[in-house]
Amino acid sequence: MAQPAAETEFTLDTAAELAAEESAAVIRGRSPWYLAWRRLRRNYVAFGFLALFVVIVVACLLAPVYAHHVAHTGPNDTHVLDTITVHGKRIDVVSKGGVLGGKLVASTPVGPQWFAAGGKYMLGADTLGRDIGVRLLYGGRTSLIVGIVSSLICVVAATILALLAGFYGGWLDFVITRFFDLFYAFPVILLGIALGAALAINGIHWGPIKVQSGNILIPTLIISYVLIPYVGRPLRGQVLSLRQKEFVEAAIAQGSGPLRIMFTELLPNVASSILVFFTLIIANNIVLEAALSFLGAGVQPPTASWGTLISDGQGLIVTRPWFAVMPGIAIVLTVLALNVFGDGLRDALDPRAKVKVEH
Amino acid sequence: MRRRQRWTWLLSVGALVAGFALLAAACGGKSSNANKNTNTAGSQGTSGGTAQNKPFANFRIAYDTGTDYLDPGLSYTVEGWAIMWNVYLPLVGYKHVNGPDGATLVPYLAKSLPQISSDGKTYKLTLRKGLKYSDGTAVKASDFRATIERDYKVDSPGVGFFSNIVGADAFSKTKKGHISGITTNDSTGAITIKLTQPQGDFQNILGTTFAALIPAATPAKDQSTHPAPSTGPYMIQSYKPNRSAIVVRNPQWKSNKGTGITDVPNGNPDKMTFDILGDPGVALTRTLKGQDDYDFQQPPPDRLNTLQSKYSNQTKVYTPANTYYFFMNTRLKPFSDVRVRQAVNYAINRQALVRIYGGLANPTENILPPTYPQYKKHTLYPYNLAKAKQLVAASGFKGMSVTVWNHDRGQDPKATAYLTDVLNKIGFKAKEKIINSSVYWTTIGNQATKAQIGFADWFQDYPHPLDWFDVLLNGTRITQTHNNNYSNFDNKAVNAKIEALKKQTKLTSSVNDQWAALDKQAMQQGAWAPFINRQFVDTFNSDIDLGCYINHVLYQFDFATICHK
């Protein structure tokens, strides 16, 4: 006969574990968040990719340190006529080109120097002699800021709309749902390009709100705006379902007001979905920012972002393909890290949930 | 059996014909290769191509996104004019030939060049009889007056050219009635133009696309996507902005040509398809792979080695009359201060800008390009960043926010990325504003935009200094919209000098010296920050016979005269 444990955690990890525990354990209640954490910390793949994301974030945050102490140049500083010394030999950062000696000669920036030029141009230069390594890190800061802030705005706005629509129902639900449908009717990229192209020229001038063109707040707002329905609609479905539950009816019977019910009864019950959405949509927004910036409707030059770097590298795709590939790899790794971690988080918080971002 | 016998006989004949065809192709191939070797890349200036009559089905052009309009009254870009040169004919025009002779004016729709009165103020022309538009309607002398009046009604960027016509100023205000200085007679075809004062470049102005005849009934609004009927060898079949344009033969051209128009060739392609592409790399690849026949765009600078090593017999290098410059809006701070404009001129390293354009350029501080006899090189602004910083500090505008404008096409955005960095280095807080190239010129040419500083370039409309100074720097020609004087440069002394030189009907050496002095005077005031005279590369696919290549002094590569091998 098994020795009963003095105190055993109720973890719901597997049916077998549960059966074993139930047979002998003194069951102690744990909060859903604690249980989720228990499940998450056993998912080593998710944690591995979270670590990768943290490394990328830290590297991007250290961009000024790299620029100042290693590369000795800023992200937008041009060095078209500069030279560097590589293995005792002076070479042009951007080579001379044109019609030389009656022949066409290509003008090409230096490729990756790694440590041969004392830390300068480790990943090479672009056609303006700007350090690609510095711009890659600064570009990462921009892309991550746009991705995270736009996700935050998107999730907050979508949650409020979903709570209002799901709780009140009726005409308010009708209006909000049609608003979601309206956005669903447009492909996200096309809507983003249309808004980006329009706002890139004049900026935003809505009454007291004034944002100059070129400010990264513009692509941030555009991206958050176009994705609201993709988060809001599934959340509204969950709220509608929860609205019918007994605990909500009980709260109403106790005389709780709508705001109290929405924020103390309904919100905690959809919080896990919101958290998973937030994680997954950051990855989605980083890709969207890159796409819009590549097409000229997102982050405006000379500000570096991974999207603008791919666009800059496009002109050198034949002779210096790494210039476009490197920011692409950075995007892939970041998105992969966030998606795998987001999936792990979803499995931990609610294994039955089908939360995903589709557009 | 009979049938079989016949089939066998046909097969024998077919084999014989095929054998001869192969033999002929082999001989042709040799001859063509011999031609290729003479068309080496890097040949400077214009080549000696001779137009041959070799019609073929379709000439496919990888075009760029710079076309503003395909309406002769509104377009003012190289892209627009290059298409419309063979579509809308003015009363007079230019020979379709290589070299300086291309600047020779010849009669197009007019029977002869204008008769000019002894006081230089009256121009008389006669329209050829029997001319028809592509829709079959007759061309009338009164259409000329209607065309010029329509230019005013659509706020054409070319109206400044016609302001010297008697009554044009009054018409520009009311846009009703007629311009009193233009009288026409539809029955005789007589056209008389009276000017308020003599004007040295007026014949050239009559040869611009703005003066190309279209029917009087053409609506006074942009007709780019509903092309107006044409008089030239071609007509625009369709235009989808930023996507494509298709130009086909004008069914009335044979009869128009029969009226005696000798200096406009029939053209070889039956059709010209313009694929509008945003990426120069894609345009080059499509051309080299044979998806397009000609790359209108400039190859990315890093692809020049490949062009030289593999495709040297498919390229042509040339230097048209052009100046690339940064405009500085003198109506807006900080560029209202001459010290700031001079600072920008000192701060930009023109050699760096040459390299940004892949070395296919020569540095310049002049307004006029070196191909002009009036050009005298001046070096007022040697690169001096320290002096530039001092001038900005002295102006009191240090730390001010500045927006640098540009379009999104080719290498040009890199020039403003460089300028933005330079402006930040000399004490401003500069940022870029990059917009689509198809709306760029109309946007910065609108005073409401208040563009502070930005990129501009100029390619001659006609070979005369007035096309540079009068159009781009005469303060009296500044307009609210479609303004070409992006700097809003309005200097009384410069204006007066332009007006005085405008009256000179001949460009003598003394007059040329005065134009050169005016170039220096304007630059002392920092009217612009000129930086390069650019060279260009034309790239073709291997099916094109460059023996027919004509690079015109004004319109550059003449699409209509090219041949297929």
Image (cartoon, coloured by chain):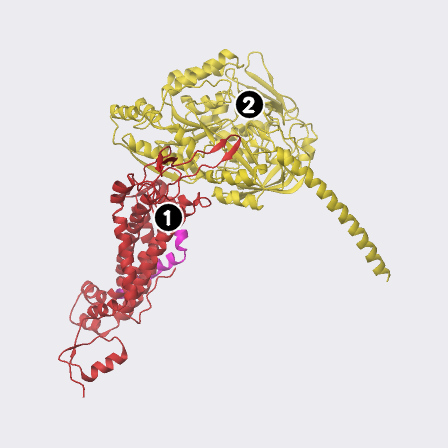
Q: Amino acid at mark 1?
A: Gly
Do badges 2 and 1 share one subunit? Answer: no
Mark nearer the viewer, 2 or 1: 1
The residue tagged 1 is A307
Towards the viewer: B152 or B233: B233
Q: Which mark is residue B494?
A: none
**Label 1 residue SS:** helix
Pointer 1 chain: A
Q: Residue furthest right?
A: B2
| Residue range (magenta) | A166-191
Asked whether residue B62 is drawn in magenta, I would say no
Colour of chain A in the rendered structure image: red
Towards the viewer: A125 or B192: A125
Q: Quadrant of residue B194?
A: top right
Chief secondary structure of the magenta span? helix
Pointer 2 chain: B
Colour of chain B in the rendered structure image: yellow
Residue A162 visible in the picture: no
